[in-house]
Image: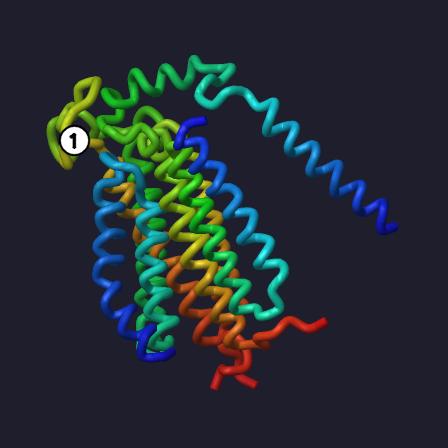
Amino acid sequence: MSVVVRTIARLLLPWVLAFGGYVIMHGHLTPGGGFQGGAVVASAVALVVIAFGAEGLKGQKNLFSFLEDLGAIAFVALAFLGIGSTFFRNVLAGGGGLFGTPVPFGPNPGWLNTGGTLPLMNWAVGLKVLAGLGSVVLLLALFGGKEDG
Amino acid sequence: MRWLRLGALLLVVGFLLGTAVWLRPFGSPTAFEMDDYFLKNAQVEAGANNVVTSVVFDYRGFDTLGEATVLLCAVVGVAFILRRVKP
Amino acid sequence: MTLWTVLHILTLLGVLAGAAVAVWLKDLLAAVIALAASSLLLSLAFYLLQAPDVAIAEAGIGAALTTAIYVLAIRKTRRREEG
């Protein structure tokens, strides 16, 4: 692509990545969550692929596959944590340990150490979505159609 | 044929506009017991301020599992179609 | 008629206009950009309807990723629509 697109992409990339990480990390406090944040980070991957070409990311294909599988397996494993009572039971919420600070009813400033398994599931789904959609864009740029060398 | 197509288009547009006009007022659902339960208890039970996330990942976790499976199947399908074949 | 209603109606009219322009244009790259603008305005409409979760998802998927996939597909095929 042209030098304008490349300069804008270079300027914009850290902010898009930071916003995606923020949306994933604060998914249990502010609007957003794993799926939305993963989509934002995957759009950063698409920005890199459009602006700089897919050849630089060619070696990362296996990394994307690994991250997607890791996210899926972590999600199902976190769901299996509560198999003692029900599938998908939130066992860590309110327990006082990891992500276990109790939350009172009503408006509050929002603490990061709350939510039980929800932040961990946010990370798992975010990893899965960013790797999945990023690898779709990457594969389409690398292997689809006539430019395939 | 042309008039038939125009009539069908007008019918669909009129139906959609009528639906938009006769819609229930925004923010007053018919069945609100479940909404009230979530709004009252989700913050204490799931420990998260964002009630939407606690519904998506805790109360309705199976839906999210299905969505993740759909995404996995889509990515596997794309990777299978766009694989490098040796000629 | 409040400011919210006026803004909402203008946003929905913008969505309709973007979709119509995307159908009307023969240059496929310009049509994809019109579709992205329509999708971004749809995300603004979701935000005005107090659904910020759906707004972020729509802005990420509809406006960014779909556009990227369409641009990649157009780069691999022809740019102008025939007929």
Mark 1: give few (<14), some (14-19) or many (20+) Cα within 10 Å. some
Q: Chain of mark 1?
A: A
Q: Position of residue A59 (x, y in %)?
A: 32, 75
Left or right? Give the position of B72 relative to A116.
right
Which residue is more in the foreground, A65 or C3?
C3
Asked if residue B80 can be seen in this view, the reply is no
Q: Residue at x 31, y 79 (%)?
A: A3
Asked if residue C73 can be seen in this view, the reply is yes
The quarter of the picture where residue C79 lies is bottom right
Q: Is residue B87 above or below residue B15?
A: below
**Residue extending furthest toward the top:** B33
Query: Circle 1 sits on which residue?
Result: A110
Q: Position of residue A80 (x, y in %)?
A: 32, 37
Which residue is more in the foreground, A84 or C63?
C63
The type of colouring in the image is: rainbow
Left or right? Give the position of C77 relative to A107.
right
How many dots with numbers?
1
Which residue is more in the foreground, A2 or A124?
A2
Q: Is residue B83 above or below residue A107?
A: below
Which residue is more in the foreground, A32 or A74?
A32
Q: Residue at x 52, y 66 (%)?
A: C30
**Residue extending furthest toward the front:** C1
Q: Is residue B14 above or below residue C68?
A: above
The quarter of the picture where residue C83 lies is bottom right
**Residue extending furthest toward the right:** B1
Query: Where's the N terminus of chain C, which quadrant?
Result: top left
- Which SS class for mark 1? loop
Q: Position of residue C52 (x, y in %)?
A: 35, 38
Q: Residue at x 57, y 53 (%)?
A: C19
Three-letter code, disc 1 = Gly
Q: Residue at x 38, y 52 (%)?
A: C60
Q: Position of residue A128 (x, y in %)?
A: 35, 53
